[in-house]
Amino acid sequence: MENNGKVIPIHAEPYGRSRQAGEAQDVLSHLVEDFEDNPASMQYFYDLFRRVYCHGEEVPHRGMLVGTTCIQAPEELIYAFGATPMRLCNGSYHYDQKGADFMPSKSCSLVKATLGMLSAETQIPKVGKPDMIVNPTTCDQKKKSSAMIGGMGYKVYDLEFPNVKESEASRVYWQRSVRQFAAELRTLTGRKLTRKNLKAAMEKTGRAQAAFRTLHNFRRKSPSLLLGKDAFLVTNAYFFDDIERWTLAVEKLNEELAQREKAGFKAVQSKAPRVLFTGSPPIFPNLKLPLLIEEAGGVVVADETCSANRMLYDMTAVDEWLVNDMVDSLADKYLKPCTCPIFTKNEDRKRRLLALMRDFNADGVVYQAFAGCQVYEMEYRSVAEEFNRMGIPMLYVETDYSPDDKGQLSTRIEAFLESLKNRKKQRA
Amino acid sequence: MNSTKPRLQALRDAVNHVQFNRFRFWFQFAAFVLFVYGGYISINLGSHMPFFSCGYNQEGRAGVCYLLPLQHQLGQPWPRLFGMAGIAVLTGFLMFALWFIVLNKGWCGFVCPLGTLQDWLTALRRRIGIRYSTYSQGQFAQLTRVKYLLLALLVLIPLGIGGGLFSHNMSPPFCLICPARMILPMFTGDFSQFTVDFSSKTSMIMTATGVSVMSLFLVGSFVKKRFFCFFCPMSALHYLLSKPALLKLKKDGSKCTRCGDCYNVCDMEIKEIADDVRTANIMTDDCTLCLKCVASCPEKGALQASFAGIPIFVSTEEGFIKRMGKGAHHGK
């Protein structure tokens, strides 16, 4: 009667949200409830994910919204133009299945989930429709997503990224590419890039990075003060959270860790095997592997992934604080230290892994490759050879966002951790 | 014993966290004053200075650049040069080497008045807000050889003069074209070097070249950081002797992430400082040992300056964050 005979539209939305929310809820409750002694200051992050992922709450942002599909898009530039960056890489199995319409079946879950999220009617995290999406031309799957994202009605900007990083030619090419990106942002926002606003933006990111580095350094302590699942959650929040609020929350967490250190607190047993995590990035709610490791009594002490360490670790140095030099310095930071497997050579990745092993006193490595993420799959061999040579045990796990392999993985991880423990015992 | 260790560590931390650019500015300023005006208070450190403390600044100099006496000595008639005078040349060189060994190329980055002057021109440009220019890698590879060529000429031409092959009007050949000869005396009010000598064809060519080089120097150093140092024959001579030097720039490649921060701030555009992770003794022939790379390295212990094997300035994360944060604030 009330509808006057109109057909009530069937929304996919509530169903989708509930499935997506269910997945997030499930991971979050494991993450929080399976462990005792979670740091009190982690509550901010638990609540944040609960509100945003489970209740679909909106995340407010300032100015225009610029989506990024990769860490290679310089966020300082986006902030300088008064816009807010938002990392679109997604970790939801629900969106992964939706995204399967766009990509061949054997492609990377992350790319599929991102496409699935962008094509969905309700997008979680709900930050809003990006005014532009920056797509750095890194791996093939991301490159090819560009046109698909464009096809969904988004404005896409392809940020040209070189695939050799040693040569000076690529450095110059990339610096030019970043300058073009700045020009594009200028057209988009109608604002100007000035020394003042770029400085302010770099300070903002710099402070966040300094907070991250402090957190990172606390993880060197043995026995650990903080679990890896929490560290991943913290860096995952950086994707969409307000940067200043995020930094404050991390600084608070750091204070708590400093107190924990003073009090001689142990987040794990002294003998817990220390694991270095590398490969395809864990992104909430796909924290399957780190969670399995820590539920089995191990602890992820460091990582070499683009959802955490690689995203926040390397800092920018500027010689002359003029716009030109600042932009070029930023470009350098986003290219030179990058250990992404899309490059021709992976010497830096191997060196970074060995340095992390040494500095974080790790016992072994877990290498996650998303099925279909060819570059990580292809680099497995050379990385394994390097670790073999150094006598470092490594577990290679090919997986995706589906929860189906959890049982099988849990057995493998338990066995791996057991072998690490035995090695430790024999050495002692 | 227990109290000295933390105190030493505290001192080390204080040094490693220093606002390096400011420290270096004042150090260079003091050195400039000393070597350009020290002569007025009768400071004389001899004539074997391993940097451009120009001898033509007759009243103010506190020591003389070794290249001046070297060229004069090599320009003696051959019978004398290859006789007893040769011993004087050798002892002179030894004195020079002893001075050099103390600071290595640190003389360039911290003491050389001509180097300091270039840094001031750079500062002027920066204040105006003009961007510096750079060389491409190809140009760099070519230009870096020029200094060796100049060094060879600086030795061969005086020898030729002594052997009667060239005119005496060419002596001392490098000084005649060196920008320091005209610029540094100007700081004590002596503009007499600022001339083209028309007394002979050779003099005219040499002094005219000198004036052009000086103009090039002023323009060049305004647009390019440490423009002249790429061509400096003293720098080439330094490099040949740098093995036993006490001040050293060291790199621990295993701690380097190749982020390129050091390369980015390097006035001399030395790519190896970032990309070479194998060489421990990382000072190259173009390096001026200004240590800006150490100050801009965020990785603890990846780069360090050591004196006689003792680390004196080491890269640290805290120092980096402090310095870059300060940098971001300056001018506010």
Image (cartoon, coloured by chain):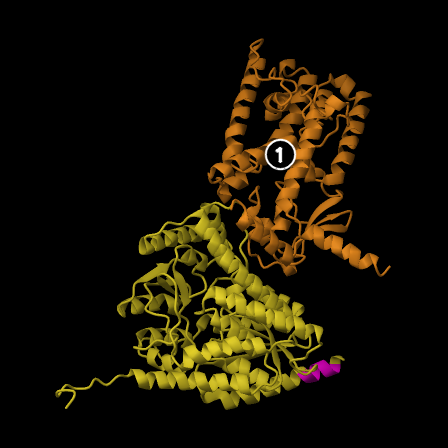
Chain colours: A yellow, B orange
Against B159, is A230 above or below?
below
Residue B132 locus on image (x, y percent): 49, 40
Residue shown at 74% from the left, 36% from the top? B100
How crowded pointer 1 is (Cα within 10 Å; few <14, some 14-19, many 20+) is rated as many
Residue A151 locus on image (x, y percent): 26, 68
Please give left or right for residue B296 compared with residue B38 in the image: left
Q: What's the chain of the residue with tag 1?
A: B
Q: Nearer the viewer, residue A133 or B157?
A: A133
Predominant SS along the magenta part: helix
* Element under disc 1: helix
- Which residue ends up furthest to the right in the rendered image? B1
Residue shown at 69% from the left, 37% from the top? B107
Which quadrant is home to the C terminus of chain A?
bottom right
**Circle 1 sits on which residue?**
B116
Against B109, is A257 above or below?
below
Q: Is residue B188 magenta?
A: no
Which quadrant is home to the N terminus of chain A?
bottom left
- Which residue ends up furthest to the left in the rendered image? A5
Could one spot residue A391 in this view of the protein? no
Q: Is residue A422 magenta?
A: yes
Could one spot residue A176 in this view of the protein? yes
Residue B30 locus on image (x, y percent): 69, 34
Residue A333 locus on image (x, y percent): 51, 56
Residue shown at 39% from the left, 73% from the top? A111
Quarter location, residue A144: bottom left
Please give left or right for residue A140 compared with residue A252 in the image: left
Q: Give the magenta part as a residue range.
A: A421-426
Against B211, is A293 above or below?
below
Quarter location, residue A16: bottom left
Against A12, is A244 above or below?
above
- Which residue ends up furthest to the front in the rendered image? A2
Task: Give, as a three-letter code, the residue at label 1.
Answer: Thr
